[in-house]
Amino acid sequence: MNNQPTYKMLRMKQLIEKTGLSRSTLYDIMDVKSKRYDPTFPRAIKLTEATVCWLESEVNAWLERKINSSRG
C-alpha cells in the first residue's frame, strides 16, 4: 500500500478561478510592499524557472479562514 501524500497543485489560472480574485489582486496580496498584502496567503512553490504553483489544500484552508472570519 502506498502511503505517499498526493498533492494537487494550482497554476495561476486555476488560482484565479478558485479564489474569484483577479491576477493583479492576487499579486498585490502576495506583495509585501502592497497595502493589500496578506501574510496568511499561501506561498507559491517554484517548480521550475518559469513555473510557480500553489498547493490546493493551502489555498482551500486560506479560503476557509476568510469565510469564517467574514461570518464572525
Image (cartoon, rainbow, N blue to C red):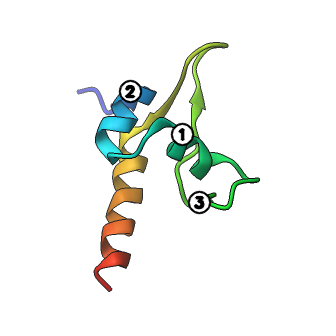
List the residue tagged with mark 3: 38
Mark 2 or mark 3, earlier in chain: 2
3 and 1 marks in contact (CB < 8 Å)? no
Q: Decide which of 71, 45 is in the foreground and name it.
A: 71
- Residue 8 visible here: no
Q: Amino acid at mark 2?
A: Lys
- Residue 61 visible here: yes
Q: Residue furthest top?
A: 49
Task: Identify which residue is drawn at 32% across, 46% down.
Answer: 20
The spot of residue 34 in percent (x, y) is: 70, 54
Task: Identify which residue is drawn at 58% across, 52% down.
Answer: 29
List the residue tagged with mark 2: 13
> Mark 3 or mark 1: which is in front?
1
Secondary structure of the residue carrying numbered label 2: helix
Mark 3 or mark 1, earlier in chain: 1
Q: Residue furthest right?
A: 33
Secondary structure of the residue carrying numbered label 1: helix
Q: Is residue 23 left or right of residue 7?
A: right
Q: Residues within 10 Å of mark 3 (few under 14, many from 20)?
A: some
| CA separation in Å, label 3 and label 1 | 14 Å
Task: Identify which residue is drawn at 32% across, 86% down.
Answer: 72
Locate the N terminus and report the quarter of the image it occupies.
top left
The spot of residue 25 in percent (x, y) is: 51, 46
